[in-house]
Amino acid sequence: MADATAPFCISGATGEWEVVVGLEVHAQITATASKLFSGAATAYGAEPNTQVSLVDAAMPGMLPVPNRECIRQAVRTGLALDAVINRWSRFDRKNYFYADLPQGYQISQLFHPLVGEGEVEILLDENDEATARRIGIERIHVEQDAGKLMHDQHATMSYVDLNRCGVALMEIVSRPDMRSPAEAGAYLRKLRAILRYVGSCDGNMEEGSMRADVNVSVRRPGEPFGTRTETKNVNSVRFVMATIEHEARRQVDLIEEGGTIVQETRLFDPDRGVTRALRSKEDAHDYRYFPDPDLLPLELDEAFVEECRASLPELPDAKRKRYEGVGITPYNAAVLTAEVETARWFDALLEAGAAPAQAANWVAAELFGALNRLGKSMEECPVAPASASELLGLVADKTISTTLSKQVFEIMLETGEGAAEIVEKRGLKQTSDTGAIDAAVDQVLAANTDKVEQYKSGKPQLFGFFVGEVMKAMAGKANPQVVNERLRAKLD
Amino acid sequence: MTDLTTLTIAELRDGFRSGEFTAREIAEQYNSAVAAARSLNAYTVETPDDALAAADAADKARQSAEFGPLAGIPLGIKDLFATRGVDTTSGSRILSGFKPPYESTVTANLRSAGAGMLGKLNMDEFAMGSSNETSAYGPVISPWRRREGSNAALTPGGSSGGSAAAVAANIAAGATGTDTGGSIRQPAAFAGICGIKPTYGRCSRWGIVAFASSLDQAGPMARTVRDCAILLEAMAGFDPKDSTSFDVPVPPWEGELSGDLRGKRVGIPKEYRIDGVPAEINALWDRGIEWLRDAGAQPVEISLAHTRYALPTYYIIAPAEASSNLARYDGVRYGLRVEADGLNGMYSATRAAGFGAEVKRRIMIGTYVLSAGFYEAYFTKAQKVRSLIKRDFAAAFEQCDLILTPTAPSAAFGIGETTDPLAMYLNDVFAVPASLAGLPAMSVPGGLDAQGLPLGLHLIGRELDEQGVLNAGLAIEERAGFTAKPQRWW
Amino acid sequence: MSVTAEQVRHIARLARLEMSEEELERLVPELNNILDWVEQLGEVDTAGVEPLTAVVPNALRLRDDQVTDGECRDEILGNAPVAEHGFFAVPKVIE
């Protein structure tokens, strides 16, 4: 893979081009049990049209009543993105006809969104603060999701399922501040992490709870923005990056062939890795936004906003800095804070008394390795933080060696037994008993007189061989430091 | 036995309570009257069984002395109110066959107060009209006829024309109406009955087919001011299902009724003396002023400077909201569907076949004023003028407690007489300002014109001061001595 | 301002109203009449005036996050012109 931190340029036939990217991320508010304006459930995967109220189906005379928790989650999200919370906002109608939109309009916020400007800091290289970029957030507004159409169930008809219709979405609109697929990827991952820390959205892109509209344009470096296209509903970080790659290339080729970019809506085809213009919505859009007369202006008081603020957890950037402050390497700190489950697990580990730097190394190497092998996520981690802390404690107080700890950990994963119990039951406790160690040393030296000769005649690298043999003789339980001392005493 | 259909709701209530007659007797007489008056075309659906069931429940409840305030009262329900399992079409072909699986809050309130439903009342399609001629079910014919000459069928006004005709013709003891820009008050005036549009937010809009959400309000239409007070008390109330509903208690409007207006100042807006309004109407207005003075009120001249802009303002805002509210009629979930090529083809064919000319006209106007490039010039401008209209009222109510004007610029006109949309819109010139400001307003019969047709007087009150409006209405009613009834021809 | 037949056709398309040429011809002058008339609002000085946002002084209420509705598919689909297998059905859409 190319260096993510290097400037991203497209070399066309006529020279270099810069790509300009802005993302509109639609994040479902998964924290609520019911929809934005109705009391129907939001759970994923229900039977078609069972989580639909009369309001969602736009029956005549039905009216929207906003869900306080949706507003609260959007405000918390805004605060987590350092954004302005507008104390006065209101809902607008975005009018268009489509089979997934029963009202014939989406209740959204155009003129006065709930959340104003904020920003997200991304790090292109975890080891290098100098690769930090700030991506501006223009606004976050709250709106209704649409229903779902199924096209492959019937030869001449599409089927409409309104379960998702009316679920709350936050549309998080970035500034056109990204200049490469890598930056867009880092932004999306960071945004997803923040949403998951806040708990407003589970960031599950497979289930569609997070999707991105990707705005791409190209320009000569230093020139004004070009015309952009919008690729709708891209549902993974990888696809977003692929969309930008392809779309930028397509635009450059088109311009260089003498064509012009038209502002249009496109779709990403994941099978072919290309974007194509959307056919069904070719009508020029005119959404005829106007304030929704069924809803009064939304006014928030200080107490509401302060409660939202107070309820926020420690966020990834703050946590990363805290970890670095207790001696954890920047790389480990970045890795440990990237996912909220990891961070939560790691915080519990620290709370259980583990030494930060040692614990961080162990999680990044041993625990991640084990989970990877087992195909388990952090949420399914078979070892509790307290048990891991016990294991790390045994290494720290030299009851077992680091080498032996790996073996103990394996047993923990297999049996679920505690570390101390394993060490005790299987006699794995490390020994500093000089008598026993001396006996083993003598035995090893006696059995390898030739190597002792070679060592003494100028092959000091054989020292490691002797250590290994002694440890082997002691079944790994000898304190390596004592073994070293005793060997040196005998050999030198 | 007495003709129970000639009694007021208050009289029916008292007779039912005292055991003079049963609720079943009331319902049966009304059911017969309804069936005998089909030539008025007031009802689109008759529900005699519903009326009888409610009556039987009322009679049963009376034995236990635990019955609602409207026990035994049979009402007509404007077809804009969703009624569970009963066709609710809003006078439109596009909702043909629609049986809502729900009951509007207002009608549910009336039912739980003990009222029965005689049927669904005809109306202008989606409440868009002032003459009931836009109904897909054909126009309602007013029970009133001109005194001389022609036997021409007259309009009962609109959009609550079925409601007005039914109450005037004694085929409903009272009726629900809705008022977006005069749709309760103008037909009440045309039909010689009372009708009140309460403060915006008093009656829940939940389950009422939406026309223009920021203007729509339900209200009662009945033969007397007292009957209006009784019905409104049952209809109104906070509803958590309507975000614009007022969370305030419903006052005992009937109990507090009083025609004594001493200490009240009545505003007479000078701008409401409009060119072209018949002298009879201005003369009635002057009589109204005298009646209120007689009741103890002090008339004061006030200014509502932006009145003349109220109608154009309304005809931007109401169609804009309607164009969006009516987008849901797309042939997918209920009502009419006309198959055509593809989804958009089906939409366009369905809506073309399902909506009538006036509804289409308003959807077109509404779509246009919201469209790119025109939104600021039309819609935003109109909402600004609306602010000014509201300010005018706020300033006026510094100087007065209520406002008296005529209800409509003419008496009822003949069906088919007014074909120009703009001329039709002018019917609501006096009614629309209060709608734009969300204020309570009422029409009370004041007298007959030279043709023997009823004319109404219009009272506008402060926000939430329905009591002031009803009291002034009562004062007029007590003095106008309006006892005229249409001669039965149907 | 006055609207042209082309604009009226465009508005009709936006509003999903199929319209014959005759209907369109009839509508153009009608709409222009109405628009001419509403344009008298241009006379009103609205400098510094905020558009009306709430008809009456009432604040937006928020409801608690509780599942109180749904699980009524038969009622939802009961009035549908075409419903199959628990879905509404529409003419096939090609995206």
Image (cartoon, coloured by chain):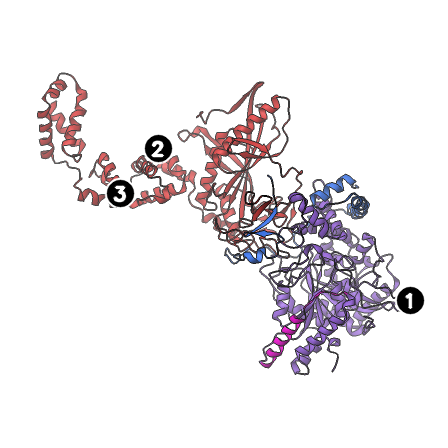
Chain colours: A red, B purple, C blue
The chain to which mark 3 is attached is A
Going by the picture, which residue comes out furthest to the top? A457
Q: Is residue B206 left or right of residue A427?
A: right
Q: Is residue A363 left or right of residue B344?
A: left
Residue A79 picture location, percent across and down = 50, 44
Q: Is residue A395 left or right of residue B473?
A: left
| The C terminus of chain B - image quarter | bottom right
Dots 1 and 2 on the same chain: no
The three-letter code of the residue at mark 1 reads Gly
The foreground one among B156 and A88 is: B156
B340 over B203 or under it: above or below: above
The residue pinned by badge 1 equals: B149
The residue pinned by badge 2 equals: A329
Mark 3 crowd level (few <14, some 14–19, many ≥20, 10 Å Cα): few
SS for tag 1?
A: loop
The three-letter code of the residue at mark 3 reads Glu
The residue pinned by badge 3 equals: A414
The chain to which mark 2 is attached is A
- Earlier-in-chain disc, 2 versus 3: 2
